[in-house]
Amino acid sequence: MIMFGFTGFAKEQKKKPKTTTGNEQVTSVAISRSACHGRCPVYHFELNRAGLATYTGIAFIPDSGTYTKNLGSGFAKKLLDMIGTYRLDTCMDSYVNRVTDAPGLEVTVRYGSKTKTIGNAHYGPQVVRRVGVIMDSVLGQKLVENTLQPLGKSWHKTTGGHK
């Protein structure tokens, strides 16, 4: 399922992507989904190059608190290198949200000591929106009608919330 996301991500690109150099290597990627005027799930999800995934459920989600899971460095490297290939560091810092009730999507990519955060990513280039979809699939989620499924048993709770 996740590999399908990689394939779909690559096929959506119209131009050949620029590759990154060694000093621009992506070290982590994170998404944050924010509230809407309804019950949209609010959470943060980050994956680092070592394969450590951290999920923090904040509101309108079945699993609140912070959870971790090791997805493996091979998988993480493949995903982060793919994200680096598409140069999210060249995107604008924020895109205009013309829908007042829409939940927000923020994508943060770390390149060593540099960080690029893209606000209102739903309204940015398709490649940025696709990172949110891929990260949700890595998390094991598919947002359907603004609801999330409970995390699988392989996630380890570290702090806060209920369960």
Image (cartoon, rainbow, N blue to C red):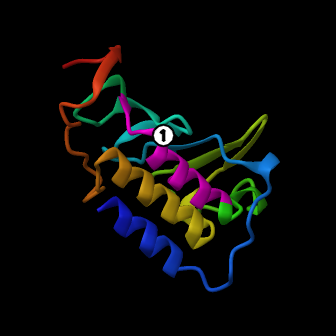
Circle 1 residue: 73
Quarter of the picture containing the N terminus is bottom left
The secondary structure that most of the magenta stretch takes on is helix
Instruction: Tell me if residue 114 comes above or below residue 64 in the rendering.
Output: below
Query: Who's the residue at 29% across and 36% down the image?
Result: 60
Front residue (pair 84, 99): 84
- x, y (%) of residue 56? 41, 29
Q: Would residue 134 be visible to someone looking at this image?
A: yes
Q: Position of residue 124 (x, y in %)?
A: 62, 66
Q: What range is drawn magenta here?
A: 69-84
Secondary element at tag 1: helix
**Res. 128 image quadrant:** bottom right
- Asked if residue 33 can be seen in this view, the reply is no
Q: Is residue 138 magenta?
A: no
User: Residue 121's x, y, as percent?
Assistant: 58, 58
Q: Is residue 70 magenta?
A: yes
Q: Residue at x 52, y 80 (%)?
A: 12
Residue closest to the eye, 49 or 134: 49
Q: Quadrant of residue 29?
A: top right
For the view shown, which residue lies furthest in the bottom direction?
A: 14
Rate crowding at label 1 as few (under 14), some (14 to 19) or many (20 or more) other CA atoms within 10 Å. Answer: some
